[in-house]
Image (cartoon, rainbow, N blue to C red):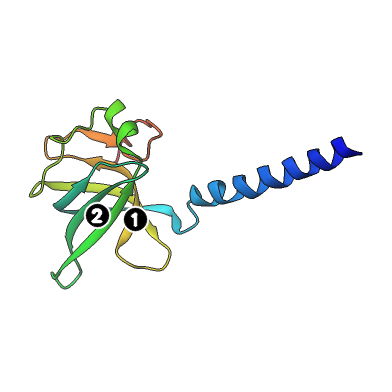
Amino acid sequence: MRFKRGLVLVTICAVTLAVPAWTHHSHGAYTDTFMDIQGVVKEVHLVVPHSWVYLEVKNDKGEPQVWALEATGRTGLQTIGVTPDYLKAGDTVKARCHRLRDGSNGCLLGFLKAKDGTVKDWDGNNAPAPADF
């Protein structure tokens, strides 16, 4: 009987700790479809657990807006060749990403075409670049 109580307690603790970790990595805040945006890099933060690229993108009226693009962590990006010198403030880039569901200026970054023309998967999946990008 004592063993069963211990097992139940361990199971409850494991589920309690696993659910927040699973929801943290959920992409539920983002739409399922991709969109393309182009803009000028304002800031790049290659950090863990998630890296960020801030782009100045012109809206339909030609007014500049800052977009926050969430990417995988620094270590994942390093494995595909993204270094601190790969992307700099002032570079014009193109991004394919999943927009935030609430319509605010942010997205989950999929692919990014850098100033030098290379395309990398910033989502951490190491997927090949799409032919239409």
Give the secondary structure at mark 2: strand
The C terminus: image quadrant: top left
Q: Which residue lies furthest to the bottom in this view?
A: 61
Identify the residue shown where x is 54% and y is 52%: 23
Q: On screen, 127 above or below 72?
A: above
Splitting the image into 4 quarters, where does residue 42 fall?
A: bottom left
Depth check: 72 or 16 in front? 16
Image marks 1 and 2: residues in contact by CB distance under 8 Å: yes
Q: Is residue 102 left or right of residue 42?
A: right
Q: Is residue 112 left or right of residue 87?
A: right
Q: Mark 2 points at which residue?
A: 37
Identify the residue shown where x is 35% and y is 30%: 128
Going by the numbered disc 2, the residue's amino acid type is Ile
Residue 26 on image: x %, y % = 51, 50
Give the secondary structure at mark 1: strand
Distance (Cα) linking label 1 and label 2? 10 Å
The N terminus: image quadrant: top right
Residue 17 on image: x %, y % = 60, 46
Depth check: 17 or 131 in front? 17
Q: Is residue 5 left or right of residue 100?
A: right
Q: On screen, 56 above or below 59?
A: above
Going by the numbered disc 1, the residue's amino acid type is Cys
Q: Can residue 127 be seen in this view?
A: yes
Q: Name the residue under label 1.
A: 107
